[in-house]
Amino acid sequence: MAKIKISAVPSIRRLPSYLHTIRQYQHEGSEFISGTLIAQELNLEPIQVRKDLAITGIIGKPKKGYPLEALIIAIERFLGWDSPQDVVLIGVGNLGTALMGYQEFQFHGLNIMAAFDKNPEKIGTTVHGVTVLDANTMGIQIRNFGVKVAILTVPSTFAQETTDVLVEAGIVGIWNFTNVKLKVPDQVIVQKENLSSGYALLCVTMQANRMDEGNGKNFR
């Protein structure tokens, strides 16, 4: 299986922010945008932005920058967001419900076509326009849908057994929002999201800022 170079991961993570900024300027009627302008908007170095955009294959024009329409197409094609991706969501709890209602997914070509849960009170209901199905029928339903990607938001104690069913049903990509390191075959890709890590970085940054402010006061 082809693997993404570790050095490219930070660039890939920044591309959605670039896309958001570029779309804002497109809505304002701009036709070109420079790497420097993107860098200013996102507090980055211009050379970093140019390197990140280079992985999409697009080339800017001297003194004009990047044509907005072509840049959006290049980024979306590189990310695979230029074609719809049907997915299923497993676990309609607070997080699962929030993800189902996240409107930005539609701009990324991601379509949550169905959700699964074991709670009888949720089965048969519709959440943010998505029908909740019985998790006990998950295997056969996923095969019938022909879907290949699943979002996993079940309680951690059920994460591995749910994953086993998903893999058996033909799922080859799992967006894992549990805190469990899933065991899957080599051909199955798991992207783990650790929500605590983002909060940890926020807290440490805030502490560092408070220390800087305190040190500044000592010099007054």
Image (tube, rainbow, N blue to C red):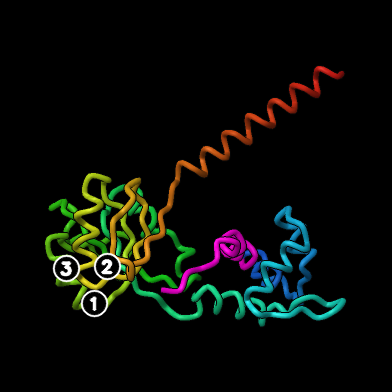
- The residue wearing badge 2 is 114
Kind of residue indicated by mark 1 = Phe
Number of numbered discs on residues: 3
Residue 43 percent across, percent down from the top left: 73, 53
Residue 107 percent across, percent down from the top left: 50, 70
Residue drawn at point x = 43 percent, y = 52 percent: 193
What are the residue bounds of the magenta stretch? 1-19
Q: CA distance from mark 1 to mark 3?
A: 10 Å
Mark 1 lies on a secondary structure that is helix
Residue drawn at point x = 81 percent, y = 17 percent: 218
Can residue 157 be seen here?
Answer: yes
From the viewer's perspective, tell me whether residue 72 is left or right of residue 214.
left
Mark 2 lies on a secondary structure that is strand
Please report contact status of discs 2 and 1: CB closer than 8 Å, yes or no. yes
Mark 3 lies on a secondary structure that is helix
Mark 1 neighbour class, 10 Å CA radius: few under 14, some 14 to 19, many 20 or more: few
Closer to the camera in the image, 148 or 66: 148
The C terminus lies in which quarter of the figure? top right
- The residue wearing badge 1 is 145
Kind of residue indicated by mark 2 = Ala
Residue 125 percent across, percent down from the top left: 21, 60
